Image: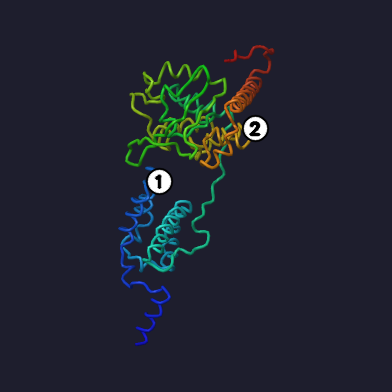
Amino acid sequence: MRSLAEKQTEIGRGEWRDPEAGAVSFRAYADKWVEERELAPLSQDLHRYLLDKHLFALAELDFDEITAPRVREWRAERLRITGAKTITAKAYRLLKAIMETAVDEELITRNPCRIKGAGKEKAAERRIATVAQVDALANTVGMRWRLMVYLGAYGPMRPEELAGLRRRDVGIGTLRIRVRLAEPERMNGRRVQGDTKSGAGTRTVILPAFLRRELRWHLESYAESGPDGLLFVGEEGAPLRRSTFGRKWRKWRKAREIVGMPEGFRFCDFRHTGHTLSTRSGATLKDTMVRAGQSSEKAALIYQHSDDERQEEVAAGLDATVRKARDAARTEKEPDKPSGTNLARDR
């Protein structure tokens, strides 16, 4: 009778729950959770990777078996085995989000993910390449890919944005590139076409003038023909792949060694280089956010006054900064040569 009375009290308070509600397979629920979120392809790949490789120990459990002590045990085990704090934090955040939905749907009464700070990632210090290092890397990776290095650094564009560029996106006369879409490569090796990563969507990047010759030469030599022809393709005409500038690409690894870049320097680190050089050239934070496409829709309204005229000023400042660094490097190499012997400038 006491048990019945307690249940009636819980029902009256709205606190009663079906004891069988938590008897739901975590993995089955998690798969459905990912599917229903309509995530971007790469985000979907990441979630499924985390479920397969890092949350597998919880896969066969029901929700009512995933307790706070078990979550702590799982996290400690992942850190002990992998030593990877960043990926463990990502897995923990995914677990916490799934469990929170389960709470909302009354499968469990409380989220068992209660470890303070467990979902936070401590970002490593971003590496910055010098102008000389960018030039050296561009020269070392070969003529087919040198423009990609420059656009990654001075665009600065993401690898998936570079992969989606077409001839019709490029204006040599105006030195403008229209970034309309991104073509990220999924874990299965297939590319998928979609929107740019940023909520700002399509943007126009105005390039510094010293890239005019690089741009023209690349279009004449390597880009596919026709308005929809890809700007970057492999030696055999295949679309750009992750392996091209990935960790396992021998030419990229060799280039880093020759130039003296850190082992962990990634192609996407060029974006930080571009941000830094633009700021040093006089660009405001708002200018660099617009240039790199790093703004939500709300932020885009704040940054909209950074128009084409201001972006031309940013590109001109970047042009002057790079030329100055190159001239200084030539002077150090050729101290005895009289002034006026520098290479002709591209205008």
> Image height check: is 142 above or below 46?
above
The residue wearing badge 1 is 43
Q: Secondary structure at mark 1?
A: helix
Quick one: label 1 or label 2, which is nearer the N terminus?
A: 1
Within 10 Å of disc 2 (Cα), the crowding (few <14, some 14-19, many 20+) is few
Callouts 1 and 2 close, C-beta under 8 Å = no
Which residue is painted at 37% across and 80% down in the image?
8
The quadrant of the rendering that contains the C terminus is: top right
- The image position of residue 142, as x and y in percent, is 45, 23
Q: Secondary structure at mark 2?
A: helix
Q: Quadrant of residue 307?
A: top right
The quadrant of the rendering that contains the N terminus is: bottom left
- The image position of residue 269, as x and y in percent, is 52, 37
- The image position of residue 85, as x and y in percent, is 48, 54
Q: Nearer the viewer, mark 1 or mark 2?
A: 1
The residue wearing badge 2 is 280
Q: Quadrant of residue 20?
A: bottom left
- The image position of residue 51, as x and y in percent, is 36, 54
Looking at the image, what colour scheme do you see? Answer: rainbow
In the image, what residue type sits under mark 2? Answer: Arg
Left or right? Give the position of 18 relative to 176.
left
> Image height check: is 78 above or below 9?
above
Q: Quadrant of residue 129?
A: top right
In the image, what residue type sits under mark 1? Answer: Ser
Q: Which mark is residue 240?
A: none
Residue nearest the observer in this picture, 259 or 23: 23
Which residue is painted at 42% across and 64% down in the image?
71
